[in-house]
Image (tube, helix red, strand yellow):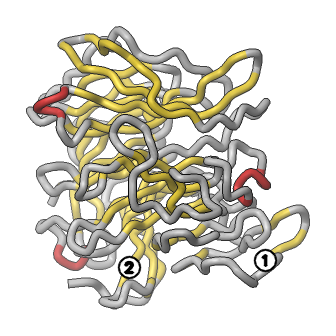
Amino acid sequence: MRSDFKAVSCALLLLALPAVAAASEEPVEVVTAQHSFKLTLIATGLETPWGLDWLPDGRIIVTERPGRVRIVEPDGTLSEPLAGAPETSNTFRDGLLDVAVSPNFSDDATVYLAYSKMEDELRWLEIAAAQLDGDALLELRTIFSSEVKVDQLEGFGARIRFDAEDRMLVTVGDHAVPMEAQDPQTKAGSLLRLNLDGTPASGNPGGDLHPAVLAYGMKNPQGLAIDGTTGEIWLTDHGPRGGAEINRLIEGANYGWPLRTFGDWIGEPGAVETEGFEEPVFTWGIAPTLSLSGLEIYSGTDFPAWNGDLFAGSLSQLALIRVMLDDDGAVVGTEYVLDGNIGRVREVRQGPDGRLYVLNDEFEGGIFRIDP
């Protein structure tokens, strides 16, 4: 059941963890408000890991922002970087971002990669598809470009998920050019729905919006989750300073950035404009600054009180945050499930085994699993 526990509490640790992924190989017990769990280090030796997904045989494919793709065996063995990864910039917060395994992988052996492309000092978001063959990515081809080329080093998004109809959902940041998010004909600052070949999917809102866009007015959405029961789509978004948001998708909606924000934007704290924009389900307001990245809806069986709740990573607060929902989908509380244990939390995913897996964005990063 979903929790109606109304609290904001930090996890209590029975044994402290180091600040980065050079953690003990022994699981560490953590106590939270309603459940205790063991934090297990699955793999280490990753440099600023960004995204992960599962292959049908149970292995994990993971990206490192400097431009490497690796395979993690079930015993935690880390492969050498796969040959054939896309060329990408890697200067600040740009680089190789998310990875997603095709819903038809058994037939097409395809993986999708999101990354910032650079040419003549300009950067933009691209998505490429490639066939995974042993230790190589073959037939790499670009299937999507944001076409918003900027002299910026951040703000590209980008999460990839697939809906029940095998359409690709992609979050795209504003490319650090805020007003791009308010242009309905651009692909920046938006959530897109694409076919597997990168073309706009049928059934998108259309009209004044770019054919690929489902919703717009977003700053840097780096968390994306689909409820496996209802099909509802949830997103996180960064604020400027403060102003982090949890959003539920309303197709065709404008989520307001940068005209409406709940953070500190150009010296104006709080909401700047309020008319004509979709309201977030929840915002932390002007403080703290969270820099949310990664989002999952828990549906496992190990922790019943968590069922149906959201889990979001926080880069700035070095935390994994549980966002508690009632039966109507309203936020009734938050809890820091991890609080400084493993450093910057970049991604959280529920694996095929029903367990939550967490990536930490550190120079010596790793993959951690939350076990009962």
From the top left corner, tell me how far across and down residue 327 is, in percent.
Answer: 30, 89
Q: Residues within 10 Å of mark 2 (few under 14, many from 20)?
A: many
Q: Residue furthest right?
A: 267
- Of the residues shown, which amino acid type is indicated by label 2? Met
Q: Secondary structure at mark 2?
A: strand
- The answer to whether residue 282 of the structure is visible from this angle is yes
Residue 254, image x, y percentages: 63, 70
Which secondary structure lies at badge 1? loop
Residue 74 placement: quadrant: top left
30 over 146 or under it: above or below = below
- On residue 270, which mark appears? 1
Residue placed under numbered mark 2 in the picture: 324
Count of labels in the image = 2
Residue displayed at 56% across by 27% down: 95
Residue drawn at point x = 69 percent, y = 17 percent: 119
Residue 194: give x, y in percent of width and height.
41, 47
Q: Which quadrant of the structure image shows residue 234?
A: bottom left
Residue 308, by quadrant, is bottom left
